[in-house]
Image (spheres, grey):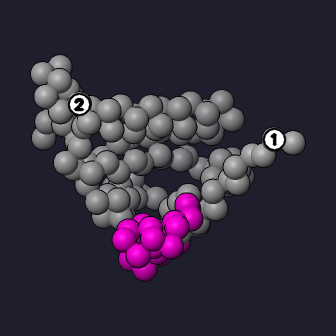
């Protein structure tokens, strides 16, 4: 849906993935972690690699659909980082995917979507997750 809107309005999309700061090994100057860091903190290295791959693949998919797209992985709390990125990039709106939490998840995890809707000065478009495909 975001790709369709971007093409319709001739707008660019910037993919932002916020990673828990405890899992972000980059140096304050933006330098990537060393191999020693990745050996000492394998979970952090795996989390960062997953985030990088997700952003890279999403940007690649969008560009293949003729959408002007870029992306970044940022450390920190998702809502704060998304709002900060939107402000820095001069965004007109935020498009956010939504996942459904189990009843236990709703009790133990805060909803990034709900919090973003409450705090964002920009319009927020929430796109439901695609249902899992079924084989017949």
Location of residue 130 with respect to 48 vertically, above or below: below
Within the magenta stretch, is there residue 1?
A: no
Query: To which quarter of the image does residue 72 belong?
Result: top left
Within the magenta stretch, is there residue 121?
A: yes
Query: To which quarter of the image does residue 105 belong?
Result: bottom left
Mark 1 in CB contact with mark 2 (< 8 angstroms): no
Q: Position of residue 80 (x, y in %)?
A: 30, 64
Tell me the residue at 22%/41% (across/down).
Answer: 24
**Residue matched to label 1:** 135
**Residue matched to label 2:** 42
Secondary element at tag 1: loop
Estimate the spatial distance between the alpha carbons at disc 1 and disc 2, rounded to whole Å.
Answer: 36 Å
- Range drawn in magenta: 98-123
Residue 34 at least partly seen: no
Q: Which mark is residue 100?
A: none
Residue 60 at least partly seen: yes
Tell me the residue at 17%/24% (across/down).
Answer: 39
Q: Position of residue 76 (x, y in %)?
A: 25, 55
Q: Is residue 133 left or right of residue 80?
A: right
Location of residue 47 with respect to 86 vertically, above or below: above
Q: Position of residue 63 (x, y in %)?
A: 61, 33
Viewer-nearest residue: 54 or 66: 54
Secondary element at tag 2: helix
- In the rendered image, the residue lying farthest to the right is 136
Label 2: how many residues lie within 10 Å, few (<14), some (14-19) or many (20+)? few
**Could you tell me which quadrant the C terminus lies in?**
top right
Figure label count = 2
Query: To which quarter of the image does residue 32 belong?
Result: top left
Q: Is residue 20 left or right of residue 25?
A: right
Tell me the residue at 65%/30% (across/down).
Answer: 64
Label 1: how many residues lie within 10 Å, few (<14), some (14-19) or many (20+)? few
């Amino acid at each position: 849906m975001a790709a369709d809107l971007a093409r319709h309005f001739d707008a660019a999309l910037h993919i932002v993935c916020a990673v828990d700061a405890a899992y972000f090994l980059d140096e304050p100057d933006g330098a990537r972690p060393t191999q020693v860091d990745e050996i000492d903190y394998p979970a952090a290295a795996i989390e960062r690699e997953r985030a990088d791959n997700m952003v890279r693949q999403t940007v690649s998919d969008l560009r293949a659909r003729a959408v002007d797209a870029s992306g970044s992985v940022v450390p920190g709390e998702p809502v704060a980082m998304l709002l900060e990125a939107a402000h820095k990039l001069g965004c007109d709106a935020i498009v956010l995917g939504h996942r459904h939490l189990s009843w236990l998840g709703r009790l133990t995890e805060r909803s990034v979507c709900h919090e973003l809707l409450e705090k964002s000065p920009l319009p927020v478009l929430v796109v439901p997750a695609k249902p899992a495909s079924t084989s017949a």
